[in-house]
Image (cartoon, rainbow, N blue to C red):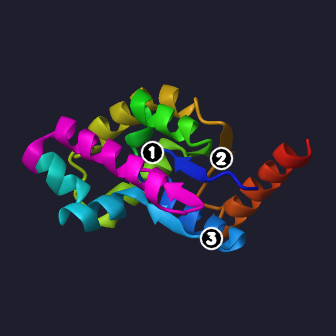
């Protein structure tokens, strides 16, 4: 499989952990887009959203995604929870012939991870706001090429193995 893989899904669904497990199987580099933005901007996505607003963050996110796709050899890229909702970002992923995988986790699991992380989530400050955002983003996530269910019982390596099986059927099927 020579195509790069982009993992999409709601915050707390496990994108980064699954991307790490998948890249280990594939023997390539993994980039977490939010970490890439944090390193480049010297501020976290949450800080950018709080200080400059969500539209400013989304512009930074799109530039970062373009740079990752143009200038790195990462085989797996974990997007931030809202990146895939942008038509521009989906077009960038398609233009670079990446395969998109939706890591679909139930809201209760995502919320449990969000609430226990201790991380500031300005777009999901409480359960009700997070659930509304979760529901509004599902339509965008459904546009991903492959759909994989994530549950608390399934480890990132197990999910990565399922993805590899699905990828092999794409190549051979």
The residue indicated by pointer 3 is: 28
Magenta-colored segment: predominant secondary structure: helix
Distance between the alpha carbons at the discs numbered 3 and 1? 24 Å
Mark 3 and mark 2: Cα distance apart in space: 23 Å
From the image, tell me which residue sits under label 2. Answer: 149
Label 3 or label 1, whichever lies nearer to me, is: 3
Q: Nearer the viewer, residue 131 or 101?
A: 101
Front-lying residue, 11 or 86: 86
Q: Is 56 colored magenta in this rendering?
A: yes
Residue depth check, mark 3 versus mark 2: number of the one nearer the observer: 3
Q: Is residue 124 visible?
A: yes
Residue 167: numbered disc = none
Screen quadrant of the N terminus: bottom right
Element type where label 2 sits in the image: strand
For the point 35% across and 31% down, the residue is 132
Q: In the picture, which quadrant includes the C terminus?
A: top right
Say which element carries label 3: loop
> Image point 54% across, 63% down: which residue?
74
Q: Which residues are magenta?
A: 51-79
Q: Position of residue 91 (x, y in %)?
A: 49, 31
Q: Is residue 113 left or right of residue 157?
A: left
Q: How many marks?
A: 3
Residue that appears at 22% across and 44% down: 57
Position of residue 151 measured from the top left corner of the image (x, y, whole percent): 61, 54
Residue assigned mark 1: 10
Query: In which quarter of the view is residue 100 placed?
Result: top right
- Can residue 86 be seen at all in this image of the molecule? no
Which residue in the rendered view is the most extreme toward the right?
Answer: 172
């Amino acid at each position: 499989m020579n195509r790069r893989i982009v993992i999409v899904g709601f915050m707390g669904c496990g994108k980064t952990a699954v991307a790490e497990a998948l890249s280990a199987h594939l023997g390539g580099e993994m980039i977490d887009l939010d970490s890439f933005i944090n390193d480049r901007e010297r501020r976290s996505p949450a800080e950018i959203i709080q200080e400059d607003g969500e539209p400013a963050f989304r512009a930074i996110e799109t530039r970062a995604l373009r740079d990752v796709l143009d200038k790195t050899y990462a085989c797996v890229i974990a997007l931030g929870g809202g990146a895939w909702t942008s038509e521009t970002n989906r077009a960038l992923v398609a233009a670079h012939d990446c395969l998109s995988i939706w890591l679909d986790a139930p809201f209760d699991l995502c919320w449990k991870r969000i609430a226990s992380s201790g991380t500031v989530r300005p777009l999901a400050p409480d359960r009700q706001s997070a659930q509304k955002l979760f529901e509004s983003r599902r339509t965008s996530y459904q546009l991903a090429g492959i759909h994989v269910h994530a549950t608390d019982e399934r480890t990132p390596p197990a999910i990565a193995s399922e993805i590899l099986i699905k990828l092999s059927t794409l190549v051979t099927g």
